[in-house]
Image (tube, helix red, strand yellow):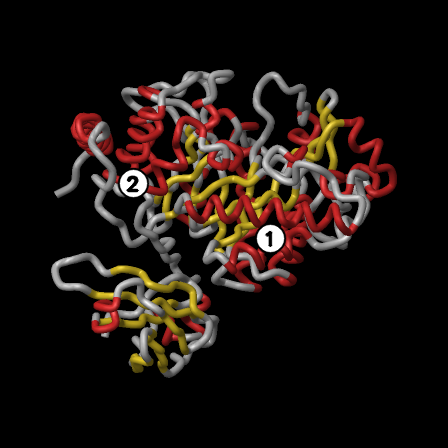
Amino acid sequence: MSFPLSRCFLSLTLLIACALQSVVKALPLSAHNHPAVRREVRAVWLTTLQGLDWPSRPAVTEDAARRQRDELCRQLDKLQAAGINVVLFQTRLRATVAYPSAFEPFDGVFSGVPGRFPLYDPLQFAVEECHRRGLELHAWIVAFPIGKVQAMNRLGRQALTRTHPELCKRAGEEWYMNPALPATADYLAALCTEIVSRYEVDGIHLDYIRYPEKGIPYDDAADYRRLAPKGQSKADWRTANVDRCVQTVSEAVKRLKPWVKMSCSPVGKYADLPRASSFGWNARDAVHQDAQRWLREGWMDWLFPMMYFDGRHFYPFIADWKEHEATGAVIPGLGIYLLLPSQKDWPLLAIRRQMAVSRFVGLGGHAFFRARFLLDDVKGLASWLRHDFYAQPALVPPIVPPAAVVEAHPELAAAPDAPELQVERRAHSLHFRWQPVASPYPLTYNIYRCEAQRPPVLVAKGCTATEFALTPALPSLLHARYVVTAVDAFGRESRWP
């Protein structure tokens, strides 16, 4: 039996309304009200543009560079303590980057001088420190905006407007890459594959992969007349241009490392709904992001829609995202900056309610814009996450291997086999050993403690070796049951032995 889309939407909306009532009643209670979840994205955007999150100061000496690195380590410690498991690290800022690139110059935020090497590789350092803490790092790439005219003038010959002027279009005092040109898609793909080939990033995250909104004087009338197929509307042509960029980048990355997760941050409302208007600001029609198609086609593994609003602007639209989640995951981006008195001065309850309802309807997790407000524990958000909502760690959801990968390696059609664990007690410690599981791609291992009538406790995750030592906090835990699981590069975990 099938149901009309509108009927499905109304059912899901009703479900969310019921969930909202339950959540509102539960929220004032004491900590640990929320059941643990084994898999959930808990992400944060860490903004390097203008040092908004990091670094707070440029480094012009070795000692200053050390302080800059120490600052990032302290921030990652706090994010880890708050339960974060994915860091969206801004790697391409505005046609400037956070690593030594063959394509674009260093951003001046690191060294104080645009284009100057900052005495160390910020991206490499961030990857290593995230992985040291069990955090994934996704390279956040600002796609089409290039920057202000003055900023490009300061870069001189290194500016993209000088190295590839044919890809650039001026709109008032801003420069943009031109998505109408296939060469723009190729350029972005080459930049992303440079990152993926040189760094062990866990994902590529595309931002501003969209046309400028109304009000920005972006004139592409001549491109439309010259390049659009006969009879194609300008709106459809623009959408196809953005689609081409997304597909080209995704396929290039997946050819190189098919386990690297592809994600993007579309506008928070996909389109107008039968009973909810986007008031002219949505992904599909306002800025030509057909993000639900990108998920459906497998070009994206995860979507982080920027849902920086509340009430009727939030809840009907998470229902729509959930209904079209397809084989990937949708992770609502939450505007925690709106907690600030200088912004909308939301109560913490607004964010808590959004998170609880998103989890209740089965979305893929949460993402916070941006790191500074978690680090500053605005209105106690980080404390609440640490002691309540994220009190138990969670693994990120798996992604689906590309069909070409499964065809080349049929053994990847299923999750890996479970290793056999050997446990040796030595005084107050436990020493675990297991045989490696065969796989054509990287594998890691998780260790769990199992107690009767309680959820399994994740003791260690992301182990790359085949041995691990543990000193339990309580002597009784020396006699508990432990299991080890294998996790393949796509995040799929073996069955429990």
- Give coordinates of residue 469: x percent, y percent: 39, 73
The type of residue carrying mark 1 is: Ala
Whether residue 346 is visible: yes
Give residue 388's mark: 2
**Residue shown at the point (42%, 78%) measured from the top left:** 466
**Residue shown at the point (37%, 42%) measured from the top left:** 330
- Give coordinates of residue 116: x percent, y percent: 81, 46
In the rendered view, tell whether residue 472 sits above or below residue 218: below
Helix or strand or loop: what does disc 1 sit on?
helix
Give residue 21's mark: none
Look at mark 1 in the image and give the residue it sits on. Answer: 126
- Is the N terminus in the top left, top right, bottom left or bottom right quadrant? top left
> Is 275 in front, or is 376?
376
**Residue shown at the point (45%, 28%) measured from the top left:** 378
> Is 364 in front, or is 229?
364
Residue 54 sits in which quadrant? top right
Q: In front of the other: label 1 or label 2?
A: 2
Helix or strand or loop: what does disc 2 sit on?
helix
Q: How far apart are marks 1 and 2 (CA)?
A: 27 Å
**Residue shown at the point (27%, 72%) measured from the top left:** 483
In-image side of 355 versus 154 (left or right): left
In the rendered view, tell whether residue 86 sits above or below residue 226: below
In-image side of 162 versus 381 (left or right): right
**Other residues around mark 2 within 10 Å, as few (<14) / some (14–19) / many (≥20):** some
Sequence order check, earlier mark of 1 and 2:
1
The type of residue carrying mark 2 is: Asp
In-image side of 283 versus 171 (left or right): left
In the rendered view, tell whether residue 185 sits above or below residue 156: below
- Give coordinates of residue 314: x percent, y percent: 34, 25
- Is the C terminus in the top left, top right, bottom left or bottom right quadrant? bottom left
